[in-house]
């Protein structure tokens, strides 16, 4: 049997996606600081907000109703943040290593690269957030898994929103070069105040509430509070979050493909580097 | 009839007001070695980038291995590969890991065996598990070449394949390329401004100056036509606009 296969799948290829995924796993496996870094911030956040929660538990009726609101919020916020960063950082690795030219001379389609980035983002998010959930259980006797099945819906929605933002940012970095790299760390934080992570959307000015509900994250965090405080799962909220995520994921992929085309027009795939 | 591996017509690339490639047309015969020869800024790398589909042309047609590269590049990419000193492989990955990743991207089977075989041919066995970034320039060039050969391409595009190599390593690379071409019958297009390399490897030379083709022919025929001792003198005539190049311009 020949090693070199002549008819390579011209369409979406799981083997090519897997090939890229192991490229990022190799990188991760060979660098313990990168692995530690992933778990570092979620763990720090859990400690910080754990103490704040303990304080409010003694002083606030609202928090007393649901001890886990803040801890759940901080863990879910990290899913969104890690989801976006997981896509952007893996893409930046290609830019830093000046490897894009080789990648796109191979029969790799841009959307296969995007799929590999998303899969890697899932792995990075799980590696980062899961240890923090155990810390929360160990030190504060709070298990985010008590949210039950709704937790899966919250996780998936926040992860996909992170992907959408990360994919769009990767496209912009491809088009505008590593000078735009800081977008990878900044953009998601701009969405935090209107995502209602630590407070209900009703706290925001009325005009801003409309803007907030354009974000899947606002629906997720409202849904989380509904489960924790009122003990009910708001399916409508989740359906709206899913619909918005589909829209934003399409926009993110569209931005990436548009920037990829511009990068080919401006010969950036041959020039990009540190 | 000679089979054509690359057919280019009316190829043009503008970067704003700068015309990097200007109405270029040429054909590359299958199963031979063709060189794009020109000084810095002559348009060699941009032309190779357009042939690979990494750069979109402003105008023109490109046909590679029978496929329109502007519309159906994915059909022929599995049969191509390339190497360039301007595009790196990830430094933090080991040689084996880099080759494994690309073997997957090219859809190969029995990947470990293929990686082993290519590394043996490139004399990389002892470096296989070292990080690519820790290798010397010559070793990195051999790794890049191993990556370029991982799918045993029918068409190999090489941008300055021996740039920054010592004479011994450069000679090794040239001997290997000759042997590979003869063994597989592959087509090789190389961009270079190393005259000895071009004279030794190429059956056909395309001379580029300021984005335009100024001459084309076998190295011996060009030397004879310009009445010079070697290709380097021909190149200098063309680059400086002296000798036959000056008379042709008049």
Image (cartoon, coloured by chain):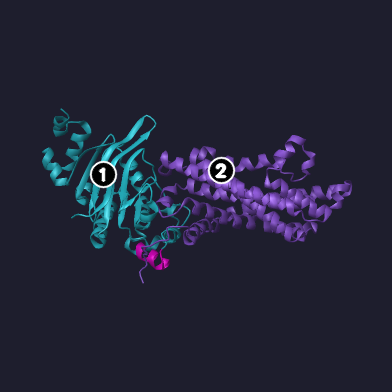
Chain colours: A purple, B cyan
The segment highlighted magenta reads B108-119
Disc 2: which residue: A169
Q: Residue A174: in sight, yes or no?
A: yes
Tell me what residue is drawn at x 45 percent, y 43 percent.
A261
Is A43 part of what is drawn in magenta? no
User: What subunit carries mark 2?
Assistant: A
Tell me what residue is drawn at x 17 percent, y 46 percent.
B219
Q: Position of residue B130 (x, y in %)?
A: 44, 58
Considering the image in quadrants, where does the N terminus of chain B appear? bottom left
Q: Is disc 1 surrounded by few (<14), some (14 to 19) or many (20+) residues within 10 Å?
A: many
The answer to whether the residues at label 1 and label 2 have Cβ atoms under 8 Å apart is: no
Distance between the Cα atoms at labels 1 and 2?
37 Å
Question: Can marks 1 and 2 be said to lie on one chain?
Answer: no
Disc 2 on helix, strand or loop?
A: helix
Furthest toward the bottom, the residue is A1
Disc 1 on helix, strand or loop?
A: strand
């Amino acid at each position: 049997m020949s090693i070199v296969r002549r008819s390579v799948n011209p369409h979406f290829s799981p083997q090519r996606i897997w090939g890229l995924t192991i490229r990022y796993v190799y990188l991760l496996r060979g660098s313990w600081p990168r692995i530690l870094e992933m778990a570092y911030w979620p763990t720090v956040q859990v400690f910080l907000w754990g103490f704040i929660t303990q304080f409010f538990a003694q002083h606030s009726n609202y928090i007393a109703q649901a001890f886990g609101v803040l801890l759940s919020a901080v863990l879910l916020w990290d899913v969104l943040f890690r989801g976006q960063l997981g896509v952007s950082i893996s893409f930046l690795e290609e830019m830093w290593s000046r490897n894009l030219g080789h990648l796109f001379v191979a029969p790799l389609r841009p959307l296969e690269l995007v799929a590999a980035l998303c899969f890697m983002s899932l792995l990075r998010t799980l590696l980062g957030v899961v240890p923090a959930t155990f810390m929360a259980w160990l030190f504060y006797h709070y298990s985010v898994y008590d949210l039950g099945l709704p937790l899966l819906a919250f996780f998936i929605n926040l992860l996909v929103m992170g992907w959408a933002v990360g994919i769009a940012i990767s496209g912009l970095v491809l088009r505008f070069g590593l000078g735009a790299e800081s977008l990878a760390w900044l953009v998601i934080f701009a969405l935090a105040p209107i995502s209602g992570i630590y407070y209900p959307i009703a706290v925001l000015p009325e005009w801003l509430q409309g803007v907030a509900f354009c974000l899947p994250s606002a629906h997720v965090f409202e849904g989380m509070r509904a489960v924790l405080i009122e003990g009910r799962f708001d399916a409508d909220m989740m359906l709206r979050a899913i619909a918005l995520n589909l829209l934003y994921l399409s926009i993110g992929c569209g931005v990436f493909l548009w920037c990829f085309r511009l990068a080919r027009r401006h010969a950036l795939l041959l020039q990009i580097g540190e | 009839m000679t089979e054509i591996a690359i057919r280019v017509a009316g190829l043009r690339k503008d970067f704003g007001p700068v015309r990097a490639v200007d109405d270029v047309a040429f054909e590359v015969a299958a199963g031979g070695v063709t060189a794009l020869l020109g000084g810095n800024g002559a348009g060699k790398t941009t032309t190779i980038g357009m042939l690979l589909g990494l750069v979109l042309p402003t105008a023109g047609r490109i046909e590679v291995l029978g496929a329109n590269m502007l519309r159906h590049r994915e059909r022929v990419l599995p049969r191509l590969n390339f190497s360039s000193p301007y595009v790196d492989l990830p430094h933090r990955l080991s040689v084996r890991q880099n080759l494994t990743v690309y073997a997957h991207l090219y859809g190969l089977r029995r990947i470990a065996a293929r990686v082993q075989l290519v590394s043996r041919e490139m004399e990389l066995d002892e470096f296989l598990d070292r990080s690519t970034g820790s290798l010397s320039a010559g070793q990195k060039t051999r790794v890049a070449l191993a990556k370029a050969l991982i799918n045993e391409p029918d068409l190999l595009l090489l941008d300055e394949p021996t740039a920054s190599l010592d004479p011994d390593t450069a000679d090794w690379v040239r001997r290997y390329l000759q042997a590979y071409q003869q063994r597989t019958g592959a087509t090789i297009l190389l961009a270079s401004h190393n005259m000895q390399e071009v004279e030794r490897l190429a059956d056909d030379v395309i001379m580029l100056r300021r984005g335009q083709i100024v001459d084309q022919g076998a190295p011996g025929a060009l030397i004879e036509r310009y009445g010079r001792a070697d290709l380097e003198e021909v190149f200098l005539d063309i680059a400086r606009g002296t000798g036959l190049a000056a008379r042709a311009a008049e």
